[in-house]
Image (tube, coloured by chain):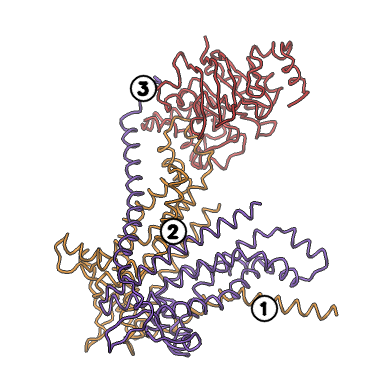
Amino acid sequence: MLKQSLSKKRKGYEVLMKAMMLLSVGLTAALVLFLLAYVLVQGVPNITWELLSTKPSYLTERIGILPDILNTVYIVLATLLIVLPLGVGAAIYLTEYASNQKVVGIIEYAAETLSGIPSIIYGLVGMLLFSNSMGTCLMAGALTLVIMNLPTIMRTTQESLKTVPQSYREGAFGLGAGKWRVVRTVVLPGCVDGVITGCILSVGRIIGESAALLFTAGFAHAVNGIIDGLAAPGATLTVALYVYAKEQGEFGVAFAIAAILMVLTVLINFAATLVQKHFAKRRSL
Amino acid sequence: MSMISVKDMCLWYGEHQALKNVDIEIPENSITALIGPSGCGKSTFLKTLNRMNDLIPGVKITGDIRYEGTDIFSKEVDVNNLRKEIGMVFQKPNPFPMSIYDNVAYGPRTHGITNRVQLDEIVERALRDAAIWDEVKDRLKKNALGMSGGQQQRLCIARALAVQPKILLMDEPTSALDPISTSRIEELVTELKEKYTIVMVTHNMQQAVRVSDYTAFFLLGELVAFGKTDDIFSQPKDQRTEDYITGRFG
Amino acid sequence: MKKKSNMFEKVIHIIFLLLGLITVGCVLLITIYLVISGIPAIREIGLVDFLFGKEWASTASEPKYGILPFILTSIYGTAGAILIGVPVGFMTAVYLSKLASPKVKSVMQSAVSLLAGIPSVVYGLVGMLVLVPGIRKIFNVPDGASLLAAIIVLAIMILPSIIKMSITALDAVPKEYEDASLALGTTPIETYFKVSVPAAKSGIAASVVLGVGRAIGEAMAVMMVAGNVPNMPDSLFQSVRFLTTAVSSEMAYSSGLQRQALFSIALVLFLFIMLINAALNFFLKREKE
């Protein structure tokens, strides 16, 4: 009885399921490897110093992506600068001030809804809200991205605030500190983890975004300082990739940008994992 | 005749030796209680008998364990058949998040029974054997997680019985239950020994005295004493056994 | 002194309340703007003609604004992506959650995160240069930019959402369930599929809904591989236009009723997304219980 082996049917099931699982994992792994390798192989040889350090010129038929790099940096900075206080503030309201569970529920539902809205709709609304009044410019794009990234910052901050022990707050209150003082001295320092994690995730999202920027930030390639840059239309790297590939058929440049984006994605993921591990370790101490 | 015979069994979790040279013969149609302080290896021993320890990484087992004369670690033995023969009831009631019927039918279905009439019969018999049929016969399609803790544990016993095992391993089956549910399970266990061989880990000395025929006392991974429950409790041969059952430590 | 600090605390409280309500304000703003700008064209074209019209010819001398081709394309495209992406993602998740060694699991999870982080234009670019020519050659069709190409790209793009969320749900299944099943003589693989997966079904369902949301909302990658002609999606090799790409492909040069109709398309897309969000919330709530 013991030495009987599994029935044919059960054995078949085992083999089939295992085969399908291994096939799926293999497929996923192969996909990631292929995408990485293909983009890097096609892109890296096209990355030259000239490409990185100049702007496109129709006269010399030269393509440079310096303006796109600068635009990306500007839009990342502008977005984070605006979204951070808003997102952190919202998170603090939810964890420290809100007493009405209904309000909390509504706010959280709104945040979830925001994170489910596709970027093309953000692009459209951003165009109506911002570009129609201030013109197509990086700032309009940044403001659109602020709405998109608000839920991310809010969520990561909220999560880190939940790990601030209640006893710290009680201790501070016990010393006679007012609410604001407690928030400033105990709660705010506690959300550093969340803010850093949220920033990394947001940077990744901003760099990768294109649909929301096409109609808000436009696709010009001019080199500007940050103030003028934000007031002028401009393409980020991702938008530039789209334009070069789809509208102009410049696949070499497109792949060069894709390779840069790929490397940035890897770095951002790496940073996110590192930071999460670091904070998890600190919390367990 | 003994259902299970263990000779010179040792078990390591990595570097740590959890069981040392255990020898034991578990007789058929009887209840054997495994007692001892926490961490003494009694649960580990129990889980070795149906090879549930195989699942823990870094476990090494030596010695000879035979079920009805067959070495359970022999390459020819299919572990799934072994576990069908040797059922297990866990410390915390753990019914699947499915209907009561599906919980009991889960085992038989796994082992290839698909005939509806046959399944109905098996489910009813298992639930009757576990003394819970009358309480649940009208709500077999209801989710098992809606039952009380004691009912859930009896359902888990029914689920184990449904695959028609010969041995039932019970790992502190009443430790998570209230006194009334506990006494119902104890009654049930005493009835079950007519059909099954039962090995039960318990923390509760009174429980061991009340229900078991044989008692094995484990301490720091060693089997210190094994014998008829009456003998162990009335005239312990070993000083450590006496100290433990009289409550001097544990 | 006391009164002054009370005032101060109250002001601070109100400031934080306002910050908290920003998300709600944004959702309302987006909804209102989309409704206001989406309604006029629908009224002018007629709801039935707009939703069920089979022809979109916005620049013709007698323009036609039927978006049924876009709606069907979005539905077929999403369904196709789900049909391919869900089995692969689900099986990967079960393997990584239950069978893989910790090392394999962590490496693969990083790989999946990377997949999630790759910008959609990069998917579009690789799709344009690998997938589209590939389809043209393999199936011997005049143009590979087609519904099929979009389905494959979308299937790849929804993989990370499905894998990540399913792993979270599967990891949360109490070990006691699995132990009970194993102790009945069920093999590990049988246990994972017959006990763990049903126990995690709400979370897995949520992952599928999330995938649907991603697929239906994706614009840029699809724009680059689907060919972008407003055909009815009669065949996999048809060049098609999705709801998302319908909005973006004409926005730059549209005006008048045509432009308003684009906003109406966005409104329809938004309604789809709200429905999907509601479904997602339903499953997530069930998972929590």
Element class at badge 2: helix
Q: Quadrant of residue C117?
A: bottom left
Residue A112 position, x and y percent, is: 52, 66
The chain carrying label 1 is C
Q: Quadrant of residue C44?
A: bottom left
Are labels 1 and 2 assigned to the same chain?
Answer: yes
Q: Which residue is the site of mark 3?
A: A4
Q: Quadrant of residue A58?
A: bottom left
Chain in orange colour: C
Q: Disc number at residue C113?
A: 2
Q: Nearer the viewer, residue C250 or C76?
A: C250
Chain in red colour: B
Lateral position of residue A231 relative to residue A162, left or right: left
> Which amino acid is tagged 3?
Gln
> Which amino acid is tagged 1?
Ile
- Chain A colour? purple
Q: Nearer the viewer, residue A123 or A25?
A: A25
Whether label 1 touches label 3, CB < 8 Å = no
State the separation of the CA atoms marked 1 and 3: 73 Å
Q: Nearer the viewer, residue A37 or A240?
A: A37
Q: Residue furthest right?
A: C1
Whether label 2 touches label 3, CB < 8 Å = no
